[in-house]
Image (cartoon, rainbow, N blue to C red):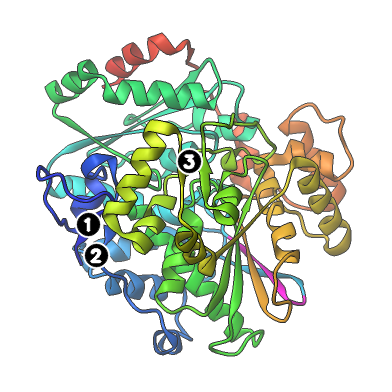
Amino acid sequence: MQFIETRGNDGQKPKKVNFSEAILNPSASFGGIYVPESLPSFDIEFLKKHIDSNYKELAYDILKEFEIDIDDETIQKALDRYDSFDDSKNPVPLSKIEDDCFVMELYHGPTRAFKDMALQPFGYILSREAQKVNQNYLIMAATSGDTGPATLETFKNQANIKVACLYPSGGTSDVQRLQMVTEEADNEKVIGVVGNFDDTQNMLKELLSSEDFKEELKKRDIKLSAANSVNFGRIIFQIIYHIHGYLELVRQNEITMGEKVYLVVPSGNFGNVLGGYYAKKGGLPVEKLMVASNINNILTDLIENGIYDMASRELIKTASPAMDILKSSNVERVLFDKFGATRTKELMDDLNSKGKYTLTKDELASIQEDFVATYSDDSECIDEISNYYKKEGYIFDPHTATCMKSYRQREKKELKSIVYSTAEWTKFSTTVAKALGNSEVKNDTEALKWIAETTNQTVPPMIAELFNKPIVHPLVVEKEFIKNEMLKFL
Ligand SMILES: *Cc1c(COP(=O)(O)O)cnc(C)c1O
């Protein structure tokens, strides 16, 4: 299958590219991104055929349906990365928390957030493809906390890839910071930046667009790639678990084949819910994709009112930092799918020049056929964590907690819901301890210990070990020194 560009073609780049090209060089004409030219079908026939497939078998067949130009051995080896999850036979367990509500736990990988679901296999494929074309690539990530650890973990000691990861010093949880600064690999560099996530991201953008820096990369024969969800290589792996979750409900006799379900997705950059949208579009019986946000509710506004307005907003720091996002990159792929390249370019040009775009009435109606949206503020999330622990003994992280208000607001109460849990509570233990009644804990060490003792939960070894590992990336710098540090690393 070929990949095309969301904002049309500028005459400089090829009109269509293979999957391997789209993932190695993910930036398309006019600042757009790549999308598949058509979508495979995930209809009842496909579902019936896969009723007995395990996760890896299903994943393999879905990748095959996309006819990607990656050889079978590479695909198999990439999927073998799921063997390192807690339960290799069942990497994404589904927990029942209400008669009609199931939590799909996407956090059983090495860094305890859903980013591993895609980044683990994707990292293997990207490195293999870079080796095949005999080219070195640099991946630069600015992270608010989950992307950084997952990117470092998947690419560590992988040939032809270098990773530089910038994080806002003081802007992540202790666990997230330790996951990054203790990661030891010759091909990776981690730099703390004095400032918040916005400063860090702006710094990265500045660096990536500086002619000077580009020249330095050229001298060293290094190309730039990306591992965030603008890369379709991430999205393709985020379609699989939506289909797997549905099949799991059929297998557990919770639904009959063909019965519709709600998918409730805590959203930031819109990559997770986009995977659900592609699955729905391919025929998965989904009533609505429910987009859950925190107080940075720009997606709620878009889906309810058809207005995407960054200009009148300031980013607010919340207890669910991975969703503290105003520029949600993957919305563009939905706009393209529904309204085409010309209109998408127009809307994105508006966003760049005015910080805002507005959909027509018909366009909004089309969005609302697939999506509904709700947001929760921090105190509502804390209440949800507290309530579900008391009621079910189940512990949500603050991101997953935003889903429960959406779930209660579903229109057709007779349908079942799948809620996506995007992080383990251990990554946000200070907030969770507060929700469970202890506001005294001063840091993650104390919070993890208190929660484990009070609730009888175990802290997984990869989190517990972090506190004893040596810190190999102590560097925290003012932003003007980043370039120098980068050049030293390269
Ligand atoms: C990345 C992340 C999200 C947001 O996912 P998107 O695909 O960017 O919408 C939500 N929760 C957690 C814990 C995350 O790490």
331, 217: nearer the viewer: 331
- Circle 1 residues within 10 Å: few <14, some 14–19, many ≥20: many
* Span colored in magenta: 99-105
Residue 147 badge: 3
Considering the numbered disc 2 on the image, is that residue within a helix, a strand or a loop?
loop
Q: Is mark 1 within 8 Å of ligand 1?
A: no
- Amino acid tagged 3: Thr
- Does any portion of residue 465 appear in the rendered image? yes
| Residue bearing the label numbered 2 | 37
Tell me which residue sits at (52%, 47%) in the image: 307
Viewer-closest of 160 and 166: 166
The residue carrying mark 3 has its beta carbon less than 8 Å from ligand 1: yes
Near-viewer residue (307 or 122): 307
Q: In this view, does 244 lie to the left or right of 204?
A: right
Q: Going 20% across and 19% down the picture, which residue do you hit? A: 211
User: Measured along the vertical axis of the image, is residue 307 above or below residue 41?
Assistant: above
In 3D space, how far apart are the residues under numbered discs 3 and 2 (Cα atoms)? 27 Å
Disc 3 or disc 2, which is closer to the eye?
Answer: 2
| Tag 1 and tag 2, C-beta contact below 8 Å | yes
Which quadrant does the N terminus fall into? bottom left
Tell us which disc is closer to us: 1 or 3.
1
From the image, tell me which residue sits under label 1. Answer: 4
In the rendered structure, which disc, 1 or 3, sits on the residue that comes first in sequence?
Answer: 1
Q: Which residue is depicted at the point 32% across and 53% down?
A: 343
- Mark-to-mark CA distance, 1 and 2: 6 Å
Sequence-wise, which precedes: disc 3 or disc 2? 2
- Please provide percent x and percent y for residue 205: 36, 26
